[in-house]
């Protein structure tokens, strides 16, 4: 059965919850399933290696996940208008996949979360797209035909799904944010199905 890789890094839980919504959207497309994975944390100083399986949540990504997927969706919290270091570290190590063309022609999308309304969501989403373009992916966004894109008072952009956690650091997406994350997952899955036909 065709699979879409939903790969994310989440520290406070917001991105993980968005990932679950993206995966729900993928599952709404007949014949498509989501393969949800995360990346291990990184540290500025040498520390003991992360265990092969996280204590909770999605399993850590393996290179085979990229080769086996029919599409992919990357998620990361925003760090000063850019993706977080753990996801960037993983992407920076994909030279072999780039050289072999493992991701060429696969539909791909991105999602993020910030603490504030103007916390760099769109620049983060755009910066996450650049490596996907280098890998030859077909980028997927959210069109304004999605009603929640016009009604949201929190996250959600045409560049990808997003969430604003606010001052209380609430990891739960609003109804509009969740609807847009599901819509993004559906769009990637639908395009992957069409490309595979």
Image (cartoon, rainbow, N blue to C red):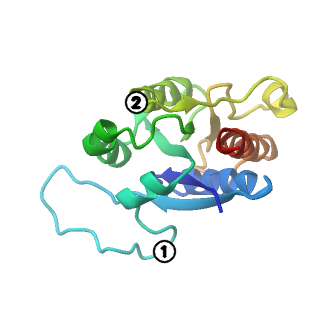
Cα–Cα span, label 2 and label 1:
27 Å
Locate the N terminus by quadrant.
Answer: bottom right
**Which residue position is annotated with label 2?**
80
Q: Position of residue 105 (x, y in %)?
A: 52, 34
The reply to whether residue 39 is in sight is yes
* Label drawn at residue 56: 1
The reply to whether residue 11 is in sight is no
Locate the C terminus by quadrant.
Answer: top right
Q: Quadrant of residue 134?
A: top left
- Outermost residue on the front side: it is 197
Q: Position of residue 123 (x, y in %)?
A: 49, 23
Q: Is 96 on the left-hand or right-hand side of 3?
A: left
Q: Given contact means CB atoms under 8 Å apart, are the residues at marks 2 and 1 in contact? A: no
The answer to which of 122 and 104 lies nearer the viewer is 104
- Pointer 2: residues within 10 angstroms few (<14), some, or many (20+)? few
- Outermost residue on the left side: it is 46
Front tag of 2 and 1:
1
Q: Is residue 118 above or below residue 66?
A: above
Q: Secondary structure at mark 1?
A: loop
Image point (45%, 58%), residue name: 65
Q: Quadrant of residue 20?
A: bottom right
Q: Position of residue 4 (x, y in %)?
A: 59, 52
Image point (74%, 51%), residue name: 25
Counting every numbered tag in the picture gives 2
**Closer to the N terminus: mark 2 or mark 1?**
1
């Amino acid at each position: 059965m065709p699979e879409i890789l939903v790969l994310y890094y989440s520290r406070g839980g917001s991105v993980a919850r968005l990932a679950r919504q993206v995966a729900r959207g993928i599952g709404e497309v007949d014949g498509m399933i989501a393969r949800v994975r995360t990346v291990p944390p990184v540290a500025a100083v040498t520390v003991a290696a992360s265990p092969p399986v996280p204590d909770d949540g999605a399993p850590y990504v393996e290179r085979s996940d990229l080769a086996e997927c029919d599409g992919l969706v990357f998620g990361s919290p925003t760090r000063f208008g850019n993706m977080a270091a753990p996801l960037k570290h993983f992407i920076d190590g994909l030279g072999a996949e780039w050289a072999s063309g493992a991701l060429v022609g696969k539909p791909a999308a991105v999602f993020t979360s910030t603490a504030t309304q103007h916390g760099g969501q769109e620049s983060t989403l755009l910066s996450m797209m650049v490596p996907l373009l280098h890998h030859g992916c077909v980028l997927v966004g959210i069109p304004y035909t999605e009603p929640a894109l016009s009604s949201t008072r929190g996250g959600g952009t045409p560049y990808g799904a997003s969430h604003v956690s606010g001052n209380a650091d609430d990891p739960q997406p609003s109804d509009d944010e969740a609807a847009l994350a599901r819509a993004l997952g559906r769009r990637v899955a639908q395009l992957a199905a069409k490309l595979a036909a």
